[in-house]
Structure formats: C-alpha cells, structure tokens
Image: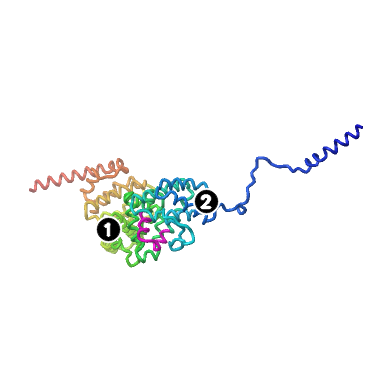
Amino acid sequence: LLLTSLCHCIRFLEPFMSNQRQQKPTLTGQRFKTRKRDEKERFDPFQFQESIVQGLNQTGTDLNAVTKFLDASGAKLDYRRYAETLFDILVAGGTLAPGGTLSDDVTCTDFCLFKAQEDMETMQAYAQVFNKLIRRYKYLEKGFEEEIKKLLLFLKGFTESERNKLAMLTGILLANGSLSASILSSLFNENLVKEGVSACFAVKLFKSWLSEKDINSVAASLRKVGMENRLMELFPANKRSCEHFSKYFTDAGLKELSDFARNQQSIGARKELQKELQELISRGDPLKDIITYIREEIKKNNISEQTMIGLIWSSVMSSVEWNKKEELVTEQAIKHLKQYSPLLKAFTSQGLSELTLLLKIQEYCYDNIHFMKAFQKIVVLLYKADVLSEEAILKWYNEAHLAKGKSVFLEQMQKFVEWLKNAEEESESEEEEAD
C-alpha cells in the first residue's frame, strides 16, 4: 500500500519536475538594445514635414506659440536627422529644391520668414525663434550654419523681398553671435558676384548687423574667421578696388564699412611694404635706392610719414641677428643704426614723425630685454645724426613717453636731457646778448 501511494505521488509530480528541467535561466535587470540598422524610422521626411507644417498652421503668426511648439516637438520629432527640412520650412515654408524653389510634392505653410512682414521688428522676433530653438537643441547649431550657407547660394531663386528678409535676419543673428561670419563665404560665389546679387545682399546684411553692433564688433567678428580682407570679393574682378568698394557702400549709407575696408587695405599694403623693406635691407641694397622705393610706396598707398617711420624702424631692427649678451648688443646696435641713420633721417622731417620714432625705440628696448640699457645711447646717436631734434626728445621726456619701462628710460635720459636744457638756455642767452 505504501509503495503504491509513492508511485502515485511520483507520477503526479513528474510534469512539474520536467518543466523545471527545461526552463532556461534568464538575466534580470538587463536591457537588450537592438542594432541601429534593425530600428524602424520613427518618421520619414514627408511625415516630418507634415507634422511641422501642421503645427505652424495651428500657431499662425504668434511667434511665442511657434517657439513653444518647436520646443515641445523636439521631444517627439527627429530634429537631428531632419534639421535641413526643419529650417527650410521655418524660412521658406516648405522643403527647398536645388536653386531655391519650393518642392511641389509636399504641403507648405504661409507661416514662415519669407511670408512675414519686411521690417526689423519682425525679423528680430524671428531671430528670437531661431535663437531659442538652437539654445534648446544645441546639436542644431552646426546644421543651422550649413542651412544659412545653402540659402545664400540660393539667393537668385528668391524674390527681392525674400532676400531682404533673409539679409536682415542674418545680420541680426551675426550680431548676437548665433552665426559665425564664415557663412559670408557663400556670397563670394562667382554667379552671385557676377550678377551683383552678393553686393546688394551685403548692403542689407551689414545695415542690419550695424544697427545691432558697432563697427568694432563687426570687425572683430570678421577677423576671427579671416574675413576682414575678403570683402572686396563681393565684386567682380574688374571692380575689385578700394575706390569702387568705398563708393558703393558709402552711397548705400555704410561709410563705416567703407572706412574699415580702406583701413584693411592699408594694413595689407603696409605688411607687404615692410616685408619688401626687410628684403632690401637684408640684401644690403644702396640707401639711395631704398629711399626712392619708400617714397614711391608712400605716394602710391597714401601712407603717412609717421606710419612709415615705424615700418622703417621695425625693418631695420629685424634685419639683424642680435647678440644675446647685453654688453655686446649695445655696441652692435650703435654700429648698425649708424649705418642706417640716413634712411631714418629721410623720413623724420616732421616733429610728429620724430616722436613716433622715439616711442618705437622705447617700445622695442622694453620688449627686447637685452636692449634695456641701450636706449639712451641709441637716442644720443640719432640726435647727433640729426634724426631726432632736442624738441622731440624733451617732449618725449616731459610728457609723451610710454608707460613701458618709463622709470628705467627716464633715469637713463636724465643727464642728457639736463645737458640739452642747459644748451638751450645758453643758446637763448647768446641770442639775447646779440640782440
């Protein structure tokens, strides 16, 4: 009886035991990721565009509502994948085909930049929409710059009003730092330049930019990306001159930009001139030939004598490999400057030029520590060579010196200045006696 009961129990438990043997172990608390290629796209471009267009149609002209809609939609829609489509819609109302025309096969909206009113207040409001969107989704920043570059290449495909709005918006975004000035490179496109589209667009853009920031801020942004010397490229090669640029933008009410471009050209010319001067001096060309060359360049590039004496000083001093020992470099400097004093004399015919040279000498001796003790001897040498007058030296000593190394250099010059003052007093006494 006991054995029979045991057999019944075994037969009853057998299915449960069998299930336990077949059950496979599982890991808890582990998430299994599917491969990227196995994931299904949440949206295709057409569905994405439909969603954005529908949202903009609902929000209408209320740009605060547009901002809220775009902020919320970023959590649902794939902005990263469809950034270009998103910006096309916000600017033009739909996806842009190559050349700047709207694609016909998709739904568009009238609630976009190109359909907005053409005034600064509206463009500033649109700029805020883009600013807030990019601040919220930082990964859109690069895509937005690429979008603007593309839009600039499409300018011929837009109406004049659409170009004006895009120019105003771009200027505002450049002013508030949302865009880099490197986007301007698209305006140098040969076809845009040839037909005058680039220059016309640039006028609107820079007016907008300068309404937000001053010319110094604009210049700093251009220099940051190496654009400060490329503005001439807005014109065809046969019109690429400082005179044409200056007249075009001055007539358009942008004299500040004209002056900036003229100054940049002058800086470029000065750099080239200094480079050539250094070569002439290093080769040991006759001073007569160097002086003739400099006078021609002054006339050609309209460079002042004060500017030129600074370039000559820098060129003369950079043409030598200076001794590193302080006690030897002074002797070397005196010998070298004695040779080139006629060159310095030829371009210090004005008191302001002499003072400029004195300041350049002070700055050089301060910046090059081995020359600190050579300052007084250099000044005395140039005084004896009739390069520097006593009036210029006394003015420098009394009021016009730089702060750099002031105490050291004034102390060095004290005895010589006292001698100059005494000599001047004696000269005045002799003149009075003669009278």
Residue that carries the numbered disc 2 in the rendered image: 78
> What's the amino acid at mark 2?
Asp
**Closer to the camera, 171 or 259?**
171
Res 86 seen here: yes
**Closer to the camera, 77 or 362?**
77
SS category of the residue bearing label 2:
loop
N-terminal label among 1 and 2: 2
Residue that carries the numbered disc 1 in the rendered image: 250
Check if residue 203 falls in the magenta segment.
Answer: no
**Closer to the camera, 182 or 414?**
182
| Residue 198: % across, % down | 36, 61
Residue lying farthest to the bottom in this orientation:
238
Q: Residue at x 36, y 51 (%)?
A: 123
Left/right placement of residue 97 relative to residue 192 reads right
Residue lying farthest to the left in this orientation:
435
Q: Rate crowding at label 2 as few (under 14), some (14 to 19) or many (20 or more) other CA atoms within 10 Å.
A: some
Left/right placement of residue 70 relative to residue 162 reads right
Check if residue 165 falls in the magenta segment.
Answer: yes
| Residue 353: % across, % down | 24, 53
Residue lying farthest to the front in this orientation:
58
Q: Main secondary structure of the magenta part?
A: helix
Residue lying farthest to the right in this orientation:
1
Quarter of the image that includes the N terminus: top right
In the rendered view, tell whether residue 418 sits above or below residue 236. Answer: above
SS category of the residue bearing label 1:
helix
> What's the amino acid at mark 1?
Thr
What segment is highlighted magenta in the picture? 151-168
Q: Residue at x 33, y 64 (%)?
A: 240
In three-dimensional space, the C-alpha distance between marks 1 and 2, rounded to whole angstroms, equals 46 Å
| Residue 15: % across, % down | 81, 41
Q: Rate crowding at label 1 as few (under 14), some (14 to 19) or many (20 or more) other CA atoms within 10 Å.
A: some
